[in-house]
Image (cartoon, rainbow, N blue to C red):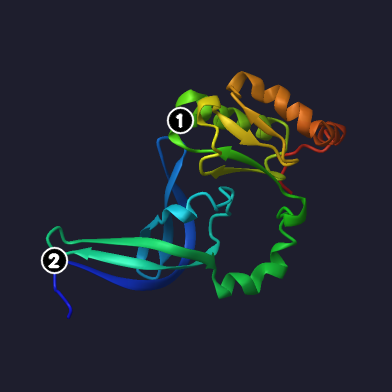
Amino acid sequence: MHIYTQTQVTEFCLEGRFLDFVIKDGYKLKALLLWTSEGECYVKLAKHLRSTFDLRLPKGTWLQVVGTKQYDAKKDKLTLKAERVMAAREEMSKQPALKNQNQPKPAKTQTILVCQKSDCMKRGGKAMCHALESELRNNGLEDNVIIKGTGCMKNCKAGPNLVMPDKTRYSKIQAAQVSALIDKHFGAEIQEQSENIAVPRFAKV
């Protein structure tokens, strides 16, 4: 027996161009902004999706989103919640061409895992994340190294916690220590970047 209420939940599937991420409190990924045939669309992300995104996703990427939509008749409000996000077919058909647009090759991409739970953030995790982003950018590594948020690493009292690409774990890492950490793990890449300094990194042809 179906019970009618003021709130109706149904499934949806839409495609659109990625516009931007919606970040709360400086580090919490909450939602996506998409441009669809009906205009700009705000789509909340289910919790299991929030730590899976590469935050360097190029704007304009075609995405297909599947999830649930909830309409609150009392508030006259429609909420979309994504359960699955994938490259749309149109985008997948363009992938060979993207290789000629200086896109980083997945095989060379390295990932730094950072705990995003509140205990780690309260112990300096937010500042550490900003320092990581800054150091990677300053050393020309932002195209080769991804910072990926994770769930609890089971070492809350020793936060902030992170895991480098070679699986080395670190605890109690503060923003002031990030520079030395990056140099320790990416010294070879940084040296290679400095040897190619004759070609301006940000020059556009």
Residue 11, percent from left and from top: 34, 73
Mark 2–mark 1 Cα distance, whole angstroms, equals: 38 Å
Q: Nearer the N terminus, badge 2 or badge 1?
A: 2
Q: Of helix, strand and loop, which one carries label 1?
A: helix
Label 1 CA crowd tier, 10 Å (few <14, some 14–19, many 20+): some
Q: Which of these two is toward me, 62 or 2?
A: 2
Residue 86 circle label: none
Above or below, comparing residue 28 to residue 79 in the picture: above
Residue 117, percent from left and from top: 47, 37
Q: Which residue position holds label 1? A: 119
* Callout 2 amino acid: Gln
Above or below, comparing residue 58 to residue 7 in the picture: above
Residue at (72, 69) in percent of width and height: 96
Q: In the picture provided, is 91 more to the left or to the right than 67?
A: right
Q: Which of these two is toward me, 36 or 204?
A: 36
Residue at (57, 74) in percent of width and height: 90
